[in-house]
């Protein structure tokens, strides 16, 4: 068995503020890390596919965060690792989607190939790998949906609040 980490954070930029008010007044950014390097997180931001660190989050003013540690099989872990590797190797082919995020807020599923917002990216990795069975399409997940979803998973090892 291996571990993956889902990090939810709260930023204060204008897009994050909009997500905060329209998405349930909780967290505004999500990212995922692998056991082999739990300090390196992968996500999407307004610049596209991003590799992030806890230090970067601190520098951007993140004060509140929530970390979920999920135990997954070696097979699931390898699927997630390969998907992340693919995104890293092809990062120029992917873009952030404000339109997808806006449609998600309106409960309108819009999956536009090679365009992601952060929680959609994390949800898609979890779904495609079989780590979690999600009841909705990955393009329909906002950050605060993860809180309800994660806390009812049998593979949840622990929850740590305010890790940053």
Image: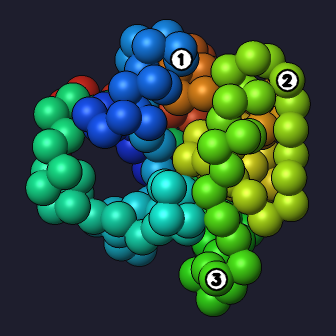
Looking at the image, which residue is at 76% across and 28% down?
103
Q: What x and y, as percent, mark residue 157?
A: 43, 36
Q: What x and y, as percent, mark residue 148?
A: 56, 15
* Label located before the other in sequence (2 or 1): 1
Q: CA distance from mark 2 to mark 1?
A: 14 Å
Question: Quick one: label 1, few (<14), some, or many (20+) residues within 10 Å?
Answer: many
Residue at the spot of label 2: 108
Residue at the spot of label 1: 23
Residue at the spot of label 3: 92
Question: Quick one: label 3, few (<14), some, or many (20+) residues within 10 Å?
Answer: few
Q: How many marks?
A: 3
- The answer to whether the residues at label 3 and label 2 have Cβ atoms under 8 Å apart is no
Q: Is residue 117 left or right of residue 22?
A: right
* Label located before the other in sequence (3 or 2): 3
For the residue pair 31 and 110, the one nearer the viewer reads as: 110
Q: What x and y, as percent, mark residue 160?
A: 27, 31
Vertical comparison of 161 with 100: above or below: above
Q: What x and y, as percent, mark residue 129?
A: 77, 56
């Amino acid at each position: 068995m291996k571990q993956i980490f889902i990090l939810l954070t709260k930023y204060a930029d204008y897009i994050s503020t909009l997500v905060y008010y329209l998405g349930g007044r909780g967290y505004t950014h999500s990212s995922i890390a692998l056991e082999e390097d739990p300090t390196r997180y992968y996500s999407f931001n307004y610049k596209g596919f991003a590799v992030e660190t806890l230090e970067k989050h601190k520098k951007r003013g993140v004060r509140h965060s929530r970390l979920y540690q999920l135990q997954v099989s070696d097979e699931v872990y390898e699927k997630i690792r390969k998907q992340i590797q693919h995104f890293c190797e092809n990062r120029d082919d992917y873009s952030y989607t404000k339109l997808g995020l806006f449609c998600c807020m309106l409960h309108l599923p819009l999956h536009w190939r090679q365009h992601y917002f952060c929680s959609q990216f994390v949800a898609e990795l979890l779904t495609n790998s079989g780590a979690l069975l999600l009841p909705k399409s990955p393009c329909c997940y906002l950050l605060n949906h993860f809180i309800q979803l994660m806390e009812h998973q049998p593979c949840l090892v622990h929850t740590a609040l305010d890790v940053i």
